[in-house]
C-alpha cells in the first residue's frame, strides 16, 4: 500500500497549490504586454519643425490606425536627420532641404524621393521693428538687418531651416563668411530654442510657420515678413536603402512613404490646424 503524505508534507502541498492558483490568473495578463512589445515599428529621422509644430501627434496615430505600424521619431535638424540615415540608424527620412535630399539619393542612400507637403518660412521680430524689416521682400529685410546692430538669431545647426536661411542671405548679397551682421548669433539649436532666444533678446528669427504658430513664448515678437515666393518650404520623404542596410525595416518604411503621399495621408496633413489655421499643405504627386 502507498504511504499517505505526512501532515507536514500535506501542508507543503497545499501551499504549493495555493501559489500556483495565484500565478495562473496572472498568466493571461502577460499576453497583451508581450503582444505590445512585438508590435511592428519603424524609426523615422525627421525635422524639429514637424515634431514641434504638433503635426506628428495627428499624423502618426492616423498611420498606425491604418497599418498597425508604430513610428518612433528622432527629431533633429535636416542635416542630422540625413546623417542618421547615412549611418543606417533610421528606416525612413522626412525632411525639408531639397538640394540635400537630392544629394542623399544620388549618393545611393535612398532610391527615390517624393514630395509630401509644403509650408513657408516667415521672418519674425519685435513689433516695434527697429531694423525696418517689415514687408513682403525677404532680401530687402535681410539687407536692412545686415546693416544694423539688432539681434539676429540663427539656428546655425545645419537644419533645413538653417540651409534656407543661408540661401536667403546669399540671395540678398550678404556674405556671412566674411561679414556677419553685428547682432548675428548662431545658437546651434532647434527651432523652439532659437525662438526662445529671439523672444528673450527681442531679436529677429527666420522660422517655419508651423513652429511659429505652435510657439507660445512670443513676448514682443510678431511676423514681419511673409508671402515672398523664396520663403516656400518643401518637405520630402525617402526610404533608406535596404541594399546598403539590409537590417532596416524597409518594407514597413515603404508602407509609411506610400501612405503619407496617399489621399488618406494627404488629408491627414491638410486637416491639421492650430487655432483654425492650416499649417501644412499636401502636394504629393497623384
Image (tube, rainbow, N blue to C red):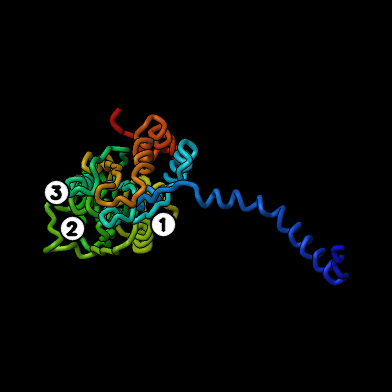
**Under tag 1, what secondary structure?**
loop
Q: Nearer the viewer, mark 2 or mark 3?
A: 3
Q: Which residue is mark 2?
A: 146
The answer to which quarter of the image holds residue 217 is bottom left
Q: Nearer the viewer, mark 3 or mark 1?
A: 3
Is 83 situated above or below 284?
below
Where's residue 231, x and y in %?
24, 43
Q: Nearer the viewer, residue 10 or 63?
A: 10
Where's residue 6, x and y in %?
86, 70
Asked whether residue 139 appears in the rendered view, the answer is: no
Determine which of the numbered discs, if any, sits on residue 65 in the image.
Answer: none
Per the model, the C-alpha gap separating discs 2 and 1 is 23 Å
Q: Which residue is mark 3?
A: 171
Q: State which quarter of the image contains the N terminus.
A: bottom right
Per the model, the C-alpha gap separating discs 2 and 3 is 13 Å
Which circle's residue, 2 or 1, is located before the other in the chain? 2
Where's residue 168, x and y in %?
19, 50
CB under 8 Å between discs 3 and 1? no
Per the model, the C-alpha gap separating discs 3 and 1 is 30 Å
Is 15 situated above or below 143?
below
CB under 8 Å between discs 2 and 3? no
Determine which of the numbered discs, if any, sits on residue 219 in the image.
Answer: 1
Amino acid at each position: 500500500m502507498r504511504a499517505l503524505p505526512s501532515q507536514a508534507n500535506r501542508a507543503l502541498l497545499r501551499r504549493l497549490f495555493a501559489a500556483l492558483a495565484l500565478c495562473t490568473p496572472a498568466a493571461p495578463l502577460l499576453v497583451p504586454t508581450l503582444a505590445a512589445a512585438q508590435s511592428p515599428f519603424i524609426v523615422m529621422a525627421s525635422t524639429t519643425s514637424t515634431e514641434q509644430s504638433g503635426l506628428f501627434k495627428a499624423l502618426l496615430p492616423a498611420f498606425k490606425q491604418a497599418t498597425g505600424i508604430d513610428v518612433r521619431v528622432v527629431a533633429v535638424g535636416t542635416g542630422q536627420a540625413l546623417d542618421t540615415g547615412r549611418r543606417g540608424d533610421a528606416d525612413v527620412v522626412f525632411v525639408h532641404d531639397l538640394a540635400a535630399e537630392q544629394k542623399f539619393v544620388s549618393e545611393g542612400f535612398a532610391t527615390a524621393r517624393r514630395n509630401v507637403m509644403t509650408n513657408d518660412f516667415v521672418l519674425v521680430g519685435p513689433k516695434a521693428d527697429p531694423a525696418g524689416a517689415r514687408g513682403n521682400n525677404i532680401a530687402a529685410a535681410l539687407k536692412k538687418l545686415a546693416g544694423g546692430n539688432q539681434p539676429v538669431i540663427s539656428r546655425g545647426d545645419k537644419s533645413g531651416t538653417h540651409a534656407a536661411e543661408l540661401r536667403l542671405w546669399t540671395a540678398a548679397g550678404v556674405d556671412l563668411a566674411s561679414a556677419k551682421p553685428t547682432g548675428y548669433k548662431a545658437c546651434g539649436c532647434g527651432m523652439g530654442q532659437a525662438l526662445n532666444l529671439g523672444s528673450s533678446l527681442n531679436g529677429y528669427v527666420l522660422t517655419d510657420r508651423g513652429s511659429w504658430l505652435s510657439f507660445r513664448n512670443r513676448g514682443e515678437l510678431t511676423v514681419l515678413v511673409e508671402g515672398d515666393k523664396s520663403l516656400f518650404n518643401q518637405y520630402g520623404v525617402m526610404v533608406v536603402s535596404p541594399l546598403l542596410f539590409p537590417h532596416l525595416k524597409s518594407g514597413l518604411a515603404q508602407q509609411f512613404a506610400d501612405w503619407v503621399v496617399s489621399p488618406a495621408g494627404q488629408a491627414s496633413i491638410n486637416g491639421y490646424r492650430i487655432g483654425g489655421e492650416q499649417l501644412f499643405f499636401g502636394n504629393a504627386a497623384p
